[in-house]
Image: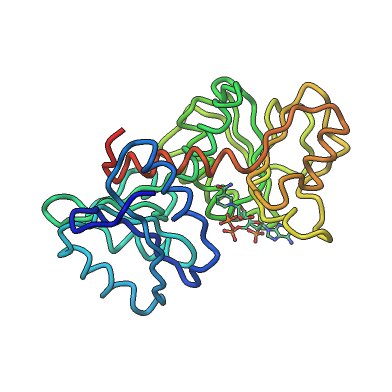
Amino acid sequence: MMEITGSTRLYGIVADPVSQVKTPQTMRKVFDKRGTDGVLVPMHVAPENLPVFVQALRGVLNFGGMIATVPHKTAMVDLCDDITPAARLVGAVNIVRRNADGSLSGDILDGQGFVGGLRQSGIEPKGLHVLLCGAGGAAKAIAFALADAGVARLDLFNRTQSKAQEIITRLQTVYPTVPMAAVGANPAGYDLVVNATSLGMHPDDAMPLDISGLSPSQTVAEIIMTPAWTPLLLAAQAKGCRIQFGLPMLECQIELMADFMGVAK
Ligand SMILES: NC(=O)c1ccc[n+]([C@@H]2O[C@H](COP(=O)([O-])OP(=O)(O)OC[C@H]3O[C@@H](n4cnc5c(N)ncnc54)[C@H](OP(=O)(O)O)[C@@H]3O)[C@@H](O)[C@H]2O)c1
């Protein structure tokens, strides 16, 4: 177990509430693997105090960066000095790096984590026809990353269809050659079907899509981590589909977050 000393570099996860987060333990493993003299601590900050908190961190010389999670991802966009095109498009930041001059750079890694998780499982999104369910924060980031990964078609289904259409309109300014449409709940004909809604977290949730359209040639991916086996994944497995759990998206992100904060490999 690493000892915290005067030269230990400081990292954080800022949230409200914060006691539920698992990132301090997960990042500990990454730091240990990389031989990093660092510690990532939970930082419980209410939304009204976020600007003054972030401003103070600019002056903390041994601060490397922080993960931002609920409810701070959107507010962090305007509190960083520069953010990546993905974060700009998604309108959210979930990782912040403190640069040597005290400036703060932000990115959103949800989408890259999802695509990285697929690739770790041997699923290459390039060239696939994809149905993405959802149009919330996670779905937006995943839509961007899938378009960036070169999918052949990206259709979105969401309860509030206008939100799906809004993502498509924004995405098409960056990826004009990828065909996209706001569609209905039928997953038939897609290579990859992704649930990026919050449906499936609770036992009495409805299915996020019409499972009668699933067939064995398809891959069905979840981003919900608890439960691991959502009703959608159980139904997909029963239909003979290949399945992808929600956890790899987070596991891949942790490594990417460490990279973004400048933690040496
Ligand atoms: N694996 C990971 O690393 C990871 C990372 C981030 C998030 N997640 C998980 O992803 C899920 C979504 O997170 P988020 O941040 O995107 O949430 P969010 O911004 O609140 O979006 C929720 C989405 O679910 C839809 N939805 C919610 N209740 C619904 C209902 N009763 N019927 C139909 N659609 C419904 C919403 O549709 P409307 O637009 O119509 O409201 C929206 O598309 C959560 O379960 C979260 O835990 C996992």
In this rendering, would 95 be left or right of 240?
left
* Quadrant hosting residue 130: top right
> How many badges with numbers are in the image?
0
Spot occupied by residue 223 in the image (x, y as percentages of width and height): 63, 45
Q: In this view, does 160 lie above or below 217?
A: below
Residue at point 27%, 47% (across, down) = 37
Q: Which of 124 and 173 is in front in this view?
A: 124
Residue at point 30%, 62% (across, down) = 78
Q: Is residue 81 above or below residue 30?
A: below
The C terminus: image quadrant: top left
In this rendering, would 40 be left or right of 21?
left
Question: What colour scheme was applied to this rendering of the protein?
Answer: rainbow
Residue at point 36%, 56% (across, down) = 40
Spot occupied by residue 231 in the image (x, y as percentages of width and height): 81, 47
Residue at point 22%, 69% (across, down) = 55
Spot occupied by residue 69 in the image (x, y as percentages of width and height): 46, 60
Q: Nearer the viewer, residue 194 or 202?
A: 202
For ligand 1, give the image quadrant: bottom right
Q: Which of 214 and 44 is in front in this view?
A: 44
Spot occupied by residue 99 in the image (x, y as percentages of width and height): 18, 50
